Image: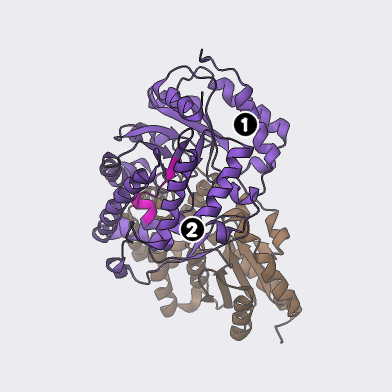
Amino acid sequence: MNSIDRIYACIKGEDRDRHPFFCVFSLYGAKLINCDLLSYYNDSNLFIEGQTAIMEQISPDVLMSPFCFAKEAEAFGCVIKYYPTSPPNVKKNPLTHPDDIYKIQIPDITNNSILKYFRESVQKLSTKFGSSTLIAAPIMGPFELAAIVIGLENFMELLLFDYQKAKYLIDLFTEYCISWSNQLAADGANIIVHPGGFSNIKMINSNMLESYVIPVLETLYAKINIPVIYHNGGYSILPFLKYLKKLPNIVGFLVDSHDDIEKSRLEIGDKFLLLGNIDGPTLIYKNPAEIKHMCINLLEKMKNDQHYIFSTSGPDLAYQTSIEQILTMKAAVVNFETAFIAV
Amino acid sequence: LEEDIKNSFFIALLNSDRILANEIIENWAKKKNYHSAVCDILEPSLKILGEKWIKNDEITFAQAFISAKIAEDILMKSLQEINTDDSFYKKQGNIVIGNIEDDYHSLGRKLLGIFLQSSGWNVFDLGNDVSPKEFVDKAIESDSKIICASAMMYSTALNIKNLRSEIDNRNLKNKLMLAVGGAVFNLHPELVDEVGGDGTSKNALDAVVLMKNLLGEVNKRGTIKV
């Protein structure tokens, strides 16, 4: 049973040899090939080299294309800053005044040199590993894109006090997100992962989710040609699952490490994939015995869950995480006997 | 009755009702003054809100953002009152604030600036991503005795170490105080010592007290001479 078989068995709720294993290894590939991050996040060949090392040394069931939203924001005019051991961050937004939103240029997804990096990465991942491994492409939704391109506080100001301008931005970015997602699908991605960086309980309450976000995501997801997994975006989403589960074209939820995974399953019902929920960025602080214990506890909770994928939650694993820590986690999953053993 | 008014104001904050919150303050200020509105209504409510924010799951960013806007509305009115009635406020001096290099989370810093201003400080807000040299240059140029460096994330908080070095390398230790703040310091109080901060406060309200104390420390030791 290869990774694709395992994931699709999980989607269908069929027997499989073990739970699928997924971590956010976008950054970690750079560590394995000892590559500086400026080069890694600009040269798709280096990204593929890093992911090849991930496959050789860890062999997860899902590979992710570059998880680097600041880089995508660069295509919209943001100035970004690179760091030695973490993904780049937006240093400066292109706008100096709220009225400047009307000057925002949507990059040409077919020719833009920055977006080309993402597209080539997906194409090469798909060509090299796509026959046996699921290729997931993370995207920003319209709200995350607006927040990163004009700044979170500027966007919040528009959303709450000048909705006409906010709506202009949301509509503009929704069209872009649809085109971008479908382009990545055409390039070889099997699934879209949408981290709801704006749509979690730390950012907004359920009223705002229902009135502002859900209608936009309904439009967006319905027009994406491949399935969507909703990612927690770094904070709890359990209270929002009852709204999110009604969205079209959504196949699963990656919940936060603070979310009760059993309650999450109860909330979404038994047809969706459920992913999570070891906190990836803080794995670095655990020794192998602690990691094994943590993983076994989680796996025990989920052993009868036909649609469960073992996964880290949150953003990338920290650069400083040791390969031993990761392999301890992987071994826990591989060696754990599920209730659904494929014959 | 006053308790009812205070509760109504707090609920208006939670409901992100900017208009109602301002109305409550206006009515209070008509009967008393804006200084009382700030001290007796705004500050206690923001304090509770801040505590809930630190607990991490009861207050959303959107609520905190609107509360900051409401606080800004009220404090700006309070500032206007200062111009006509100086008896409530004593001029505290100059102070430099900014987010440390690589940090772009400005909401807390802006709120701090407003509170300091309303407490009599002449605030020089350098904005986001401020280098150690910029901080210290501005402090010297403006004859400020305190720098407030803000950071939200662990990785950017560590950049404050470079500001500590800049202050020390220019022989300004104990003459130019370094106040540090931001969400990460609430989560990891040990960071204050690690980055070389002279003090911190849990929120913008408590910062006013901190600055008074730090100023007292400097005044004991003398003024900046370069």
The residue range painted magenta reads A136-145
**Where is residue A261 drawn, in percent x and y?**
50, 28
**Where is residue A33 drawn, in percent x and y?**
64, 50
Which residue is at the far top? A343
Above or below A152: residue A190: above
Using residue A298 as the reference point, say whether residue A74 is left or right of it: left
* Label 1 Cα crowd, 10 Å radius (few <14 / some 14-19 / many 20+): many
Which sits in the foreground, A28 or A271?
A28
Asked if residue A339 can be seen in this view, the reply is: yes
**Where is residue B94 drawn, in percent x and y?**
57, 79
The colour assigned to chain B within the rendered structure: brown
- The chosen color scheme is by chain
Q: Which residue is mark 1?
A: A330
Parent chain of label 2: B
Q: Nearer the viewer, mark 1 or mark 2?
A: 1
Residue at (45%, 62%) from the top-left corner? B38
Pointer 1 with pointer 2, Cβ within 8 A: no
Amino acid, disc 2:
Glu
Asked if residue B71 can be seen in this view, the reply is: no
Parent chain of label 1: A
Which sits in the foreground, B177 or A341?
A341
Q: Which residue is mark 2?
A: B43
* Label 2 Cα crowd, 10 Å radius (few <14 / some 14-19 / many 20+): some
Are the residues flagged by discs 1 and 2 from a single subunit? no
Using residue A145 as the reference point, say whether residue B137 is left or right of it: right
Task: Give the alpha-carbon distance from disc 1 to disc 2, as whole Å.
Answer: 50 Å
The colour assigned to chain A within the rendered structure: purple
Residue at (41%, 25%) from the top-left corner? A11
Using residue A31 as the reference point, say whether residue B12 is left or right of it: left
Residue at (36%, 63%) from the top-left corner? B31
